[in-house]
Image (cartoon, coloured by chain):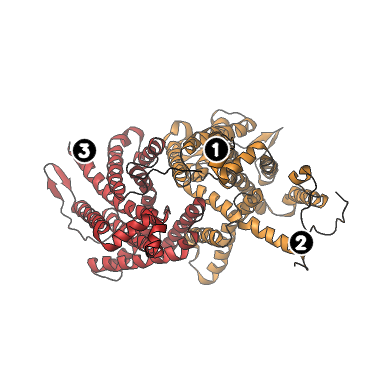
Chain colours: A orange, B red
Amino acid sequence: MRPRNPFVMDCGVFTTNYREDMAIIHHPGAKLKVLAVIAFFLVFPFMVGPYYVSVANLIGIAIIGAIGLNILVGFTGQISIGHGAFMGVGAYAAGILTATLGLSFWIALPVGGLVAALIGGLFGVPSLRLKGLYLAIATLAAQVIIEFVIVHWPALTRGPAGMVLPAPTIGGITLDDDTSFYYLILIITLAAIVFALNLFRTRTGRAFMAVRDRDLAAAVMGINIFKYKVTAFAVSSFYAGVAGALWGHYLGVISPEHFTIHVSILYLAMIIVGGLGSVMGAIYGACFMTLLPIVLRELADAFGRSFGGLTHVMLSMQEAVFGLLIILFLIFEPDGLAKMWRNVKNYFKLWPFSY
Amino acid sequence: MSFFLQILISGLVVGAVYALVAFGFVLIYKSSDVINFAQGEFLLVGAYIALSLVVFYQVPFLAAVALTLSMCVILGIVVERLVLRPFIGERAISVIMATLGLSLLMRGLIQMIWGTETRTFPGIFPDTPVRMGDVVVSQVYLWSLAIAVLLLAVFTIFFKYSSTGIVMRAAADDQVAALSMGISVKRIIAIAWAIAAVVAAIGGVLLGNINGVNPSLAYIGLMVLPVVILGGLDSVPGAIVGGFTIGLLESLAGGYLDPLVGGGVKEVVPFVVLLLVLMIRPYGLFGKEIIERV
């Protein structure tokens, strides 16, 4: 590639060979940008108060979960309304290891992910015969059944009362405040993003997309669709399990209410609003949907002071706004925030001579 | 024995309501291939509107029901026009998410208007229980069962003999062929949504008279999924058979298994059945099997 002026923007992606075409980072300027973003997040806790760090932590966890769901729904085309339950499986598996058996968090975290992957793969088996609407209903059954087991197996999960989880420790440091946990979440979130970005440059990732686009055609081309559908369920649930385990240990307590169907719908909303079939979309959606209730609450507080009595309808209003946003995004920008951001960037790439 | 009969009757009543709600669900699916996750919220809206009319505006019960139903007709048509019309021919995920979003939106609005506490209908059906042998049944149950069964019969006849019913069946069978015969499929879909909203509202009023009205009533919208999967997503008789089967099953499981595991079996048994049905016979008892070709 010809050396180029680093201070002007690209007016397009021009590649001359496959290696360049497959690259995640297309030119040195973008590499600088990524490094700058990572550097920003490294110093982020020192620039803002602990409240914003805790919000960032929740966003990080949501990003992991949303990427997982997007791998399944956006990239493989298998609809799941059971993501919240799979997060619960990961959280409870990890929680049982740390709180009940006293094992280290560093063992419990991957094991939580693996157990969730196993259960998720199991509930992915119906995808052999079902697709579309029917599969969505099967995953809804998974959600209901897993929730039932969590509530009604108190010997293992302590039932509706929930479990108290210990804070993870590393080399004598206990990760029990927002800032220390922030770095743990940051590292895992980055790993999750990099893994997902790379997954779609491999045979497996391409097979996922072939299954999404037309599964019969994929089967004709020699892709074992059952294997890849179950793999997608397992990978997605692994992400969910890790996110759940992190969430549980960050909150310090888990109970069945954390993993209801509402959580599943919230994560679906994230990837719809962010953009189906896009890793960046999952990130934008997770940020958006985590920040939205916070912004709404601020607004309600502000208005509540002048009008009064608005705060008690807050939760209902939040639900209504979520629903409205999902519908509006689906109608007006089905590819979500990721597409909107791309449109803005494309506009400025050619600005001011866009024609 | 009397315990068994008691359970049987409450199962039949719940099953009848399931059948009603599932009926609307199947109607929408048949005419437009949409799975309506907001069916439970339609039920809730109907129950709340009727309740408000009866309690706050002192409208006589039957007039209140008539008013509620006409409002639900409008609601069904408006929802179809504003929310679902843009999704004709879209991917399954978009349609599912649209109705999930609709259910969130409706539930949020309902809770903003009516709050979350349980409200009860003033006694409309006589309080005195009926004795049948050694079983005691409250009249609400019998009335609900009778009304639901009557409505199911009316709608079945409507579909079989009325011209609108025949047109609807034609549109469900083959949209393109129906269009070429001069049938407006858009109108059919709107009618389907209106009928679905109406039957859901009736279900809501009946259940509201039995248990009181609160937002958790919308859970019926989820419980109706096992019903329609068992009966077949596109089969009206399937919805009726499935409704009664699941209602009875749920009641029996709740009565006999709950003491063993400590409650909650009622909610999970239908979904276990659902998974089994999906594994063995995905198109349900009476559904049409879809054969896919490349």
Chain on which label 1 sits: A
Which quadrant of the figure contains the N terminus of chain B? top left
- Apparent side of residue A65 relative to residue B16 in the rendered image (left or right): right
Q: Which of B27 and A314 is in front in this view?
A: B27
Question: Are both tags, 3 and 1, on one chain?
Answer: no
Which residue corresponds to mark 1? Answer: A229
**Picture quarter containing residue A138?**
top left
Which residue corresponds to mark 2? Answer: A349
Q: Nearer the viewer, residue A24 or B43?
A: A24
Q: Give the class, few, some or many, for how many residues have Cα within 10 Å of label 1's Cα (few <14, many ≥20).
A: many
Residue type at mark 1: give it.
Answer: Lys
Disc with the residue nearer the chain's start (2 vs 1): 1
User: Residue A88 at what x, y percent from top left?
Assistant: 52, 40
Q: Which numbered marker is on residue B4?
A: 3
Q: How far apart are marks 3 and 2 (CA)?
A: 73 Å
Q: Give the class, few, some or many, for how many residues have Cα within 10 Å of label 3's Cα (few <14, many ≥20).
A: few
Residue type at mark 2: give it.
Answer: Lys
User: Residue A14 at what x, y percent from top left?
Assistant: 79, 52
Label 1: element kind: helix
Residue type at mark 3: give it.
Answer: Phe
User: Residue B270 at what x, y percent from top left?
Assistant: 35, 41
Label 3: element kind: helix
> For the image shown, how many numbered marks are present on the structure?
3
Q: State if disc 2 and disc 3 touch (CB < 8 Å).
A: no
Chain on which label 2 sits: A
Q: How far apart are marks 2 and 1 (CA)?
A: 38 Å
